[in-house]
Image (tube, rainbow, N blue to C red):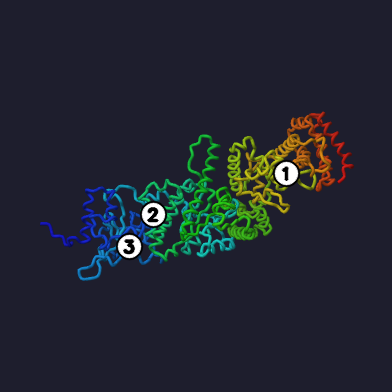
Amino acid sequence: MAPESKTPPGSVLSRVFSRFSSRKTKSAAHAPEQLLEGSSAVAGRPSSSFYLSAHSVPDSSLPVDNSAPRSLGSQPPSNHKSVDSSRRADLPWPPQPFLEPSLQPYDSSSAVPRAHGGTTSFLAGANGVRMRDIQYFEASHIIVNAGSGGAGDKSMDGWELLLKNTAPNALYNSSVQFDAPKCDEDTRVEVTSEIMDWIQDHNASRRLLCMTGAAGAGKSALQQTIAERCAKLGILAATFCFSSTDPTRNRASTVVATIAYQLGLKHPLFQSSIVAAVKRDPLIFSQSLQSQMEELIVRPFESLRRTIQPDIDTFPCAVLIDGLDECKGEPNDTADPTLLEVEERRQAEDRQAELLSAIWHCILKNGLPLRVFIASRPEWAIRTALAPGGQLHHVAYHIQLSDNYDATGDMRRYLGRRFEDIGLRIGNPHWFTEDDINALVEAASGQFVYVATVFEYISERRASPAERLRIVLGWTPHIGQVARPFKALDTLYTNILLAAKNAYEAVDTHHGRDFLLLFRAHEINVAGFASGSSLPLRFPADVLSVLLGLEAGAEESLVSDLHSLVALEKENDGDLRLHLYHKSFSDFLGEESRSKDLFVAPSRVYTHRAKCCMQHILECSLDFDSLPHTWEELPLPESHRRWLMGAARTLPFFLAQALGIDDEVFDFTEKGGWHKIDKLLPLSYRMKGWLYYSFQQWRENLRHFAFTLTVKNPEIAKVISEFVEKWECDAKGWGP
């Protein structure tokens, strides 16, 4: 005869065993709901000491995975017995102070009374017990349903599914980050202190910091430095480092899961809620970023806040996202390679904007105890979000790294320290001078990428550092040049410029425009166009755009994808002009051996400018035979008068350096172009700013052009020469 059960009939334990034995004949899909809803299988819910209400600890009562890697946290103490040691809970339990709250998710007054008084505990003295789908932790009196499919459930574990959707390489301390750049101890002190102060100031009203800066400004080095400091202080919650060249971390689809994974390691209840969400909806990772963030981050935090308040305030708070601009769009099947690149860029911008929006809606608006630090080049998504009217304009703390922090001293210390190390290695501490370092720092124009590239080239183990230093300082391109000290920089500039070119020229309204030619014209305008005199010609950006055959303001869209290298800035005279962050970028554009297929010779720019000037004069709608006495009285909008003056005053300078323009000059002459200039010159001469020597140089350039045209087209050359002689005589009577 079978031994009599020692479990009292109707006891809590017998009902549990009875409940799970009966599951063999019931649908596994309904078992959790029956347990939670207090069906007949679990009678007398209010008096059960192990029953956990769904309202007591929200979300943690949902299915919980218990197969997390052992390395994620410590195991339950060895003196706690388990019913089945082969299936004991592996749920991590980190030792930080905030992970040991006193949890009371049930009403002790409703516990089942003992036979001799007091209350009973389910499997008293045991901890970390698992019986099929039940996990029991004595320390917190929590029982959670760990599965929805019963013993025969073969579905993928929730935590495992989360891991499959993370990007391990995106962690700040991943194996691929072993040699990640970071700031030297005594460099970037001001900005690192500002960032750390912001992270640790829990009373600051803005919980999002966006740091933008030019390519190579040192954003990633700062992110790595901040991550390591936060980790040492125990306040690092999560990191995600984008990389456009690493397919495992160049998409936004893995961002939320990767951050949730790291947050889950900080507290077992947080991890339980994450796993529950994944088990509840295994397709969560294919949903929008906002939906993922709501389920995997916001709701777990809400559960944790209700459970361990006020200790939630000690939860690690720093979430660091580096290289947002390197986040790409999802794979595309477009056949045309050019269209594919353009479409991917648009998708990338949309995904970057979506991530920023999700952070705003989920983390900022819900008041989560996190401080989010994002670093990015000032590309479209973040630039638009931070601009006036943008979603983040009033809520983000914005650091403009390239504009507000002078890194000159830091770069000098950086090179000095590393050059001294090389001196120790080669046994010659005098292989460089302070003047060498000063020259390199000056050439860097405030950007760390230059000195880092130079040092990488000079420090080659199998070469002479002194010889390589001389190459860098005196490097000039020539035929047969083998040395490539700026190879890394050239690759960076090539990729950025080529992507901008493809994106610009793919726009239908830009059809037929040569992006490289137009941008090169604006780049040359930074220093000024050669005019044959000591004073170069410089134009406001809007005027130059029109003189290039574009509409006013076209320069904005021209540089839209180059904000990591250039910016349009107002100068002291109030005019908008292009500004280059890197002097080395200008060197790259001006040296064919470096820019290769992207090189645009200045003569092409001058030729295009000359053609546009002639076209602008011919298309002017003025009655040139009835002009007023002064330029200001011309019946044209002020902007049109500026453009017309620019065309008339600069045409000879561009003609003098133009190539292959004979047909256009012939057409200009036949249509009365020189006659129109003849009518405009007296008005222009009287304008303030055009001094006599400028007009003299103007005539000399035109005379030189007529001379070069004599052989090919003597008739046109004669017409131009006759006008030049006339203007030389007429100028004496124009007066102010």
Q: In the rendered structure, which amino acid carries the disc numbered 3?
A: Pro
Q: Which residue is mark 3?
A: 76
Tell me how far mark 2 sits from mark 3, CA to CA. Answer: 21 Å
Q: Are marks 2 and 1 in contact (CB under 8 Å)?
A: no
Mark 2 vs mark 1: in front: 1
Disc 1 marks which amino acid? Ser
Residue 197 at what x, y percent from top left?
54, 64
| Residue 94 placement: quadrant | bottom left
Relative to 700, say whether 189 is above or below.
Answer: below
Q: CA distance from mark 2 to mark 1?
A: 60 Å
- The residue nearer to you, when weighing 442 against 713, is 713
Residue designated by label 1: 639
Residue highlighted by disc 2: 274
Q: In the picture shown, does residue 221 fall above or below 645?
A: below
Q: Nearer the viewer, residue 644 or 20?
A: 644
Q: Earlier in the sequence, mark 2 or mark 3?
A: 3
Q: Secondary structure at mark 1?
A: helix
**Disc 2 residue crowd, few under 14, some 14–19, many 20+, Cα 10 Å:** many
Q: Residue at x 28, y 67 (%)?
A: 109
